[in-house]
Image (cartoon, rainbow, N blue to C red):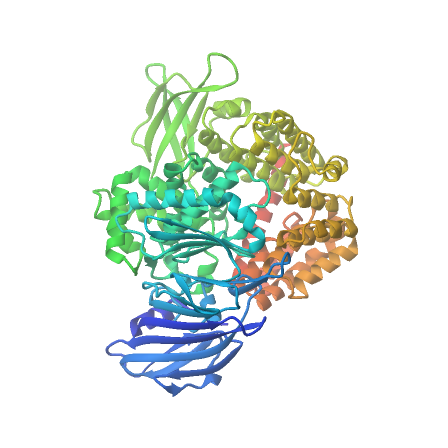
Amino acid sequence: MSVLTRDEAQARATLLDVHRYTVELDLTTGDDTFDSRTVIRFAVTAGHTGADTFVEVRPAELRSATLDGQPLDTAALADGRLPLTGLAEGEHELRVDAAMRYSRTGEGMHRFTDPVDDETYLYTQMSLEDAAAVFANFNQPDLKAVFEFTVRAPEGWTVLANGITTETADGLWQAAPTPRISTYLVAVAAGPWHSVRSEHRGLPFGLHCRRSLAPHLDTDAEELLDITRACYDRYHEKFEEPYPFDSYDQAFVPEFNFGAMENPGLVTFRDEFVYRSAVTDTERQTRAMVIAHEMAHMWFGDLVTLQWWDDIWLNESFAEYMGYQTLTEATRFTDTWTDFGVSRKAWGYDADQRPSTHPVAPEAVEDTAAALVNFDGISYAKGASALRQLVAWLGEKDFLAGINTHFARHRFGNATLADFIDSLAAATERDVHAWADAWLRTTGVDTLTPRLTNGDAGGYTLNVRHDGSRPHRVTIGLYDHDVAGDGTLALRERVDLDIPQDAPHPVGKRPALLLVNDGDLTYAKVRFDTESFKTVRAVLSGLPDPLTRAVVWNALRDSVRDGQLPPADYLETVRAHLPRETDLALVQGVLTFASTFVADRYLSPAERPAALATLASLCRDLIRRTEDGDHPGLRLIAVRHFIDVAAHPDTIAAWLADGIVPGGPELDPELRWRVLARLAVLGATDEREIDAELARDPSAAGQEGAARCRAALPDPESKLRAWEQMFTSDALSNYLFVATAQGFWQPEQSDLTEEYVKRYWTDAVAVATRRGPAMADAAGRWAFPAGVVTPETLRLGEECLRDAAPIPSLRRKLADQLDDLGRALRVREGAQKQA
């Protein structure tokens, strides 16, 4: 399959003006393929008579194609492109009749059969190149058109689309024509959906999920609709342009590769967001943020769309920023930036320090394959951080004025970075062009370190060492030990500085802690002066604000990754302060880094048992602290992580047998599978018990849990079977592949999996080539031997990148993983030297 290049897209955009797609899909033709008939009405622009171009289509069978009533040679189809040659200037009609394959990888038209009730569900995922697997089209974002779909579906199904759908006859559904949108935003979902419908301000709202999840959706429906309504109202306060589509459906679909997708009028979410087990309030906040993020896309991305994929940030960075900010302003989730700081922002920092880093707004994205791998922590988290810094520097009033100018200028059209900066410049006297060059066209993470010097009058003055090139508007917090002597810190003052700064700032007596970027309004690594670092180690949990503590925890995390803080010292700090932490996002984020990276990668195998014991002891303290039942979310986090780090099976096996943790919670399906997976790693369960648990929970999540457990069993036969399922057979769906990969590599089983380290490089390249970008991402992310931190693993990986020609999505994932592996090796070596 060929990829579309920027040059090809620009040439075709100059040549064509696409008016309308009329698409008929027949979903009743069998389990393997569906019928797709497309009529495209377009014009060749003046001065281009005799031009050649192509239409994208990736069929199982191309039955016929006609241009202006004349048949085209279907044998000319190659690499997903059907040539259109000698086009005359003026209007044309292209008709394409094809059979298309259903997908099991979450791309194109994905087909899923629910193991609970044997009901089948279909949904589309068109981004970036996969619209051609559903219908023939000119697949680039700047050739917008009107779309009108007719869908024949089995009796009893409901069909959803970008516009309001109506069943015009038994099983025949008509979708209202859309406004002008891009091909990658077209969406259809069909199946026997369970639906909850509502209306807000005259607009139809809908929630949809599989029937087997109906009770769980019904439980949360009012919460989901309340958040949707609140975000909708808040966006209408911010934006002068009203919501531009005829309805707002949110479909929770199975085996979805992303968190969600912003299809106008029909947002699709991974259906893990329909909670069937207990979750924390932070997880509910994350779901709410995704709702807010996707709704922001209705303006950022759907109404005004990027012209080419170098401006992904115009979609994702804005939706990310607006999602968090709007949730804070409009809902009960008022502390969202703490979660962003400790989870999403770390994602951006990590991505920006790898060799694969790129500017938020890169100047050259040569093709769609290169674009696909840029949906990463830079385009989301770093870009959102840059926008937060822009608002701090520009002021929200001027920022929103610029946005509304942008919407007015480009509604239902396409725009570039230059267009957006021009819109902002019209609203302010500040030099936003220079700001954009410094923030959006550069790579890497600046580092800010406070410095105190004695002033002339005996007090201290403050300046900030700035390693980097970007300007920053930052707040510096000055904290003193509380006079009560209870281990807390009191805020003396916050100093706002523009960096680079003109002169040192007087601060009087020396504070116990100087914290650069207090409030987390900029994007930079933070270091501590010597006295502040001592204070942090001693009284971190005494800082009064969770966002302040998030900045400190991120600084400690960065220090570990950069080899400046030994991982064992980080664990000591975690052990000392996390038992007193109250913010759930912080507890979750710190425990995840401590277990997944510090214990499993940064410490040597000999040091790992002691690290797990430390984390188990910490979790046990949190469980004791929450026995009163007043902190169910904190208790749930502690129970989950205690299971994950358990070095001995007795306690968690007793929980599974009793069906409850003493004092609660009861073991719901998620916790039961979690316990069983850990018991499998420890060799304390077997196939018989896994089968029994699957009989108890035969759901799709249960199927994934069983696959994870079977791959984790510590015997050669189980490992070989799991490996062959992932890399020899192509029968696993995307989710079952990930679950199997998650179970396969276990630090406790390094001797058992050693032979597969060498096999991985050949087999991953092969499966990526056969099964495409989504499975390449899964193979590179989840099946990678990340815990095998050895120079030989690094050597084999570098050899693979050099010689094996992995497809772009796998190449990018492997390059990132190998960089992380090299960092882990350096951290280990540095810790040994300091010991």
Residue lying furthest top in this view? 484
In the rendered image of this protein, does residue 651 appear above or below residue 680?
above
- Identify the residue at image location x=62%, y=66%: 766
Judging depth in this view, the residue of 412 and 436 nearest the camera is: 412
Q: Position of residue 303 (x, y in %)?
A: 32, 57
Q: Position of residue 455 (x, y in %)?
A: 35, 19
Q: Position of residue 730 (x, y in %)?
A: 64, 66
Q: Position of residue 796 (x, y in %)?
A: 64, 57
Determine whether, in the image, residue 111 is placed left or right of residue 90: right
Counting labels gives 0
Determine whether, in the image, residue 344 is placed left or right of residue 645: left
Which of the 4 image quadrants contains residue 498?
top left
- Identify the residue at image location x=51%, y=63%: 157
Answer yes or no: is residue 98 visible: yes
In the rendered image of this protein, does residue 111 appear above or below residue 262?
below
Position of the C terminus, as image quadrant, is top right
Judging depth in this view, the residue of 130 and 281 nearest the camera is: 281
Determine whether, in the image, residue 406 is placed left or right of residue 633: left
Which of the 4 image quadrants contains residue 226?
top left
Which of the 4 image quadrants contains residue 663?
top right
Judging depth in this view, the residue of 500 and 730 nearest the camera is: 730
Answer yes or no: is residue 534 visible: no
In the rendered image of this protein, does residue 269 appear above or below residue 96?
above
- Identify the residue at image location x=51%, y=70%: 27
- Identify the residue at image location x=36%, y=53%: 298
